[in-house]
Amino acid sequence: MPTLNWIGKEAVVDHHRHIPTRLLECDPKLSFGDPDAENLLVEGDNLEALKALLPRYRGQVKCIYIDPPYNTGNENWIYNDNVNDPRIKKWLGQVVGKEAEDLCRHDKWLCMMYPRLALLRDFLREDGMLIISIDDNEGCNLRLLLDEIFGSNNFMAMLVWKARQHLDSRATNGISTDHEYIFVYSRNPGAVRFKGKKRDESKYSNPDNDPRGLWMSRSILGLANAEDRPNLHYDLVDPSTGYNYPCPANTGWRYSRDTMAQKIAEQRIIFPSRRNGRPREKVFLEQLQTQRTGFPSIIDGVFTADGSKAIRAIFGDQVFAFPKAPQLVELLIKQATDEDSIVLDSFAGSGTTGHAVVAANHSDGGTRKCVLIEVLPEVARDVTRTRLQSVCEGYSDTASEVAIEGLGSGFRYCKLGRTLLDEFGDINGEVPFTDLARYVYLLETGVPVPKRPKKDCPLLGVHQGRAIYLLYNGVLGDRRPAGGNVLTNSVLAGLPPHPEGKGSRVIFGEATRLSESTLARENIVFRQIPYSLRES
């Protein structure tokens, strides 16, 4: 299989395994709406944010949609699409070393993308898929990169999106580039497929009152010449008139003699009233294997301008260059997800994916959750967050002044905190109980801890019937290194009871001395730390 090589590749292929795990800290002042919606907006570098989220979402995400920088090399917008952003340059210098001085912009882009894609793969369910937008600048490189990380046998499609509505007369070569690409890869070969579109029943009718119901006619011409498929070349006779329809020389018929005879007997072949016509076949709606058609590989009817329109409607200004249209992302999400799936976007930008998820849930009654990551604080807070809140609670269209009804839902706003683990993979001794408690509760439940954790209480809270406990740093009063951090019969007896009187208990601790049968009898799920918090 062809492979892609570039300056700096050796330095980044395993880089994602060495990213330090950092704490996630929810900011209630920047969060909004329904706390049980389990939507997250994380402010921070997506490489570090992904590593922080991995213990919670590994193997749980049904669909990842990302719209990374296209690396066009001539923009001055907030993402700095030529990959010369000072943060990226600093990161490249640290990771790649002196070789970074010789990197062209394509090398830099590949160095940036490789570890992020490698981490993203670990988030996908066994039946999950990655959907990624790109254009000609890095399209070929991205295809080879995805083949290497996901496997070429997991390639599903390269969709073509007609992104430009009107021709661009400014092109120096005289060609208006009207399209972009959307690559689709699965986690496992053949494990997932697009749902397709509902069949257009308006094309079906029943003019002859056939008891088999609605039908439409289709051609019965074949696709092979007589030399290749001689069994499909024969003259077709109408049994009611005896008229002979000569075989089309270059195509033949769709079916062999025996199959055609059976269809004639079942009155599925329609013979024309005029001798110069062609016989056709009845196709009944109810007898089709599925009531859905395939999904087109060319997407038309929604454009980049629609994304800009959606942004201006909320902000009154073009606060983000070239945002994807929410209608496009909603279309893709509905094709790739179930109604209760998790959707991840690690290049959140203006928040189109979050907008699309909320809109999809509103239209079909779904309960999808979205996890968004945005690196630039000013964008995360002033654009992504503002847009999500506006979509959830409603807003006034700045152009028409029409009130747009809110779609409901909500999100938690999180930031990256201190490093969780030290160089040996143990919990950083500077991490206090309260910070670790917030982190493990968020990882276990997807929502922030309901109350500030108490330093002397291992019970953190209850979520959907599960009581969450943390044994760490002498929370039970024993300050010895292992004192109270190991789940034993005596420690179990001293734990606060389940607040609801019944239900499972999830207990985080350094170790357990209880047998599997005891844990099952007591309805306990034990999570060993720091191992349950490590993700390489």
Image (cartoon, rainbow, N blue to C red):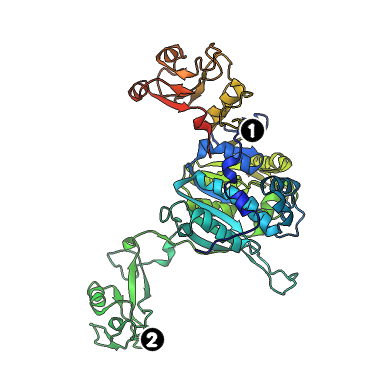
Q: Residue furthest front?
A: 98
Mark 1 touching mark 2, by CB under 8 A? Answer: no
Q: Is residue 450 left or right of residue 497?
A: right
SS class of the residue under badge 1? Answer: loop
- Could you classify mark 2 by the number of other residues whose Cα lies within 10 Å: few (under 14), some (14-19), or many (20 or more)? some
Amino acid at the residue labelled 1: Ser
Residue 425 position within the rendered picture, expressed as x and y whole percent measured from the top left: 56, 31
Residue placed most toward the observer, 170 or 97: 97
Q: Residues within 10 Å of mark 1 (few under 14, many from 20)?
A: some
Query: x%, y% of residue 72?
Result: 70, 60
Q: Is residue 380 above or below residue 11?
A: above
40 or 429: nearer the viewer: 429
Q: Is residue 58 above or below residue 163?
A: above
Which dot marks residue 31? Answer: 1
For label 2, the residue is: 250
- Give the quadrant of residue 9: bottom right
